[in-house]
Image (cartoon, grey):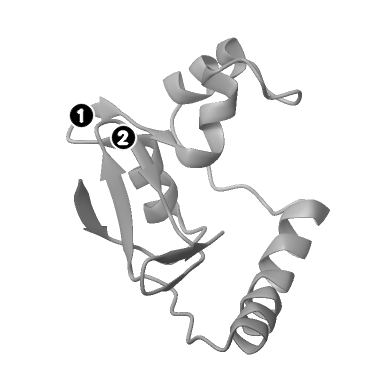
Amino acid sequence: MEYLEKPQHGSLQWLELRHKHNGKTIVGASEVSAVMGVNKYKNIIDLAIEKLQPVQLREQNDAMKRGTFLEQGLLDYASDELGVTIATPAVMYLNGRIISTLDGLAGHQVFE
């Protein structure tokens, strides 16, 4: 497992790190479902075509905006309900060719 310094979430640098690392194509944790053939919105061919293209910074759609807006509130709620301090990691986790950005950690508890 490699721990890579996380660029600003959603930035071009963040997207590039989720696209390639050390010259090898990387699959983000949210893209694994397409690789496994269980994503109803994107299949492995769509993902392959996307990975063959240069990284593009795109405007957030409504669903992405809601997720970004609600994420901190949900972490705050979980922290209050569980009585734990949840921190947002400053690193991305790379295992082989799969990379993940975790929303929050409290000890060994992962919040996603």
Could you classify mark 1 by the number of other residues whose Cα lies within 10 Å: few (under 14), some (14-19), or many (20 or more)?
few
Q: Which residue position is annotated with label 1?
A: 23
Q: Are marks 1 and 2 in contact (CB under 8 Å)?
A: yes
Three-letter residue code for mark 1: Gly
Measured along the vertical axis of the image, is residue 42 above or below residue 19? above
Measured along the vertical axis of the image, is residue 46 above or below residue 96? above
- Of all residues, the one furthest to the front in this rendering is 82
- Of all residues, the one furthest to the top in this rendering is 45
Measured along the vertical axis of the image, is residue 76 above or below residue 60? below
Q: Position of residue 63 (x, y in %)?
A: 79, 53
Q: Position of residue 45 (x, y in %)?
A: 57, 10
Mark 1: secondary structure: loop
Q: Is 84 displayed left or right of 59 in the figure? A: left
Q: Which residue position is annotated with label 2?
A: 20
Q: Nearer the viewer, residue 27 or 75?
A: 75
Q: Position of residue 84 (x, y in %)?
A: 51, 86
Q: CA distance from mark 1 to mark 2?
A: 6 Å
Residue at left offset 62%, top offset 47%: 58
Q: Nearer the viewer, residue 17 or 71?
A: 71
User: Splitting the image into 4 quarters, where does residue 68 fall?
Assistant: bottom right
Q: Nearer the viewer, residue 105 or 57?
A: 105
Could you classify mark 2 by the number of other residues whose Cα lies within 10 Å: few (under 14), some (14-19), or many (20 or more)?
some
Q: Position of residue 48 (x, y in %)?
A: 49, 16
Residue at left offset 48%, top offset 80%: 86
